[in-house]
Amino acid sequence: MKFAAINGTSIHYKLENSGLGKPLIVFSNSLATDFRIWQDCVDNLSADYSILRYDKRGHGLSGMGNPPYKISDHVNDLVALMDHLNLSGALVVGLSVGGLIAQGLYHARPDLARGLILCDTAAKIGSAEMWDERINIARQGGMGALVDANMQRWFSPAFHRDRKTDLNGFIAMFTRTPVEGYIGTGMAIRDADFRDKACKISVPTICVVGDQDGATPPDLVRDTAEMIPGASFELVKDAGHIPCAEQPAAIVKIIRGMMEAL
């Protein structure tokens, strides 16, 4: 395990194939997950690329920091982590709030990102009313009060039916997320809005979404793709909000195609 002191807290990360001259991929996770959600993708990609994964503050093995957060807190953590590790010029792959972080990283430090894959995310995700409702549920009932609805949004009916063991693992990941980390990051998502900046993204960008995503539906992700000059849109069949876990081969194909084109 590796940890770095970043912006007043401890950030847990894993850097693979550093210093071997291989092109870099940086992964940023969704709300109430840790960097293990990318494992099936990394198993395929690690032979050919340098890979950075990390747990954002309030999640996984990283420190809590001082919640609530702004999206800039998460962005600044990734910027500082990449600077700490002397990394730049990455393909940044962000899922959900990780996609907001990826957008923010590009706007803050375009030298760090030479391409973006924005998975199941948008320039703005949800309404203030929606996030306030979820935050209040978490405050009153903890993570367990949110888990069933989230699993329905995260995974397709086929995943629920055929991969119950995997589903139980994601339930454990979700419920073990610190409630303060969930609430703090929920507030960051609620207040984040990159719609006015989307037109300024000038690196190759692909917006990806599961066709059964109940959290960031395909039309929302397509709308973001249309805001970004030259961005393409990819629909992943038979997947919900976490296609890197449900259909990793499809995500790997998109990543490899982008890396070959950069």
Image: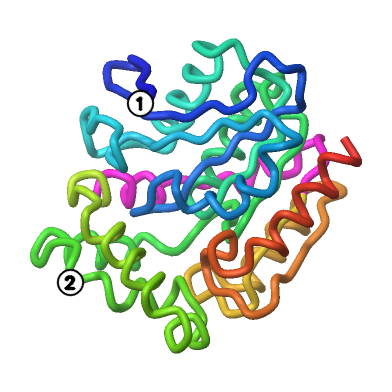
Q: Residue 84: x, y in percent?
A: 49, 11
Residue positioned 85% across, 49% down in the render: 257
Q: Residue 237: x, y in percent?
A: 69, 77
Question: Mark 2 or mark 1: which comes first in sequence?
Answer: 1
Identify residue type, mark 2.
Ala
Q: Is residue 238 above or below residue 25?
A: below
Quarter of the image with the C terminus in it:
top right
182 falls in the magenta region: no
Displayed quadrant of residue 16: top right
Dot 1 falls on a residue whose secondary structure is strand
Instruction: Give the residues drawn in magenta, as a range.
Output: 183-205
Identify residue type, mark 1.
Ile
| Apparent side of residue 164 relative to residue 20 in the rendered image (left or right) | left
Q: Residues within 10 Å of mark 2 (few under 14, many from 20)?
A: some
Q: Is residue 32 above or below residue 111?
A: below
Residue positioned 36% across, 27% down in the render: 1
Q: Residues within 10 Å of mark 1 (few under 14, many from 20)?
A: many
Tell me the residue that label 2 is attached to. Answer: 145
Tell me the residue that label 1 is attached to. Answer: 11
Displayed quadrant of residue 132: bottom left
Q: How many marks?
A: 2
In front: 219, or 46?
46
Q: Residue 213: x, y in percent?
A: 55, 74
In front: 57, or 170?
170
| Apparent side of residue 167 relative to residue 207 in the rendered image (left or right) | left
In front: 155, or 159?
159
> Which residue is situated farthest in the left direction here?
140
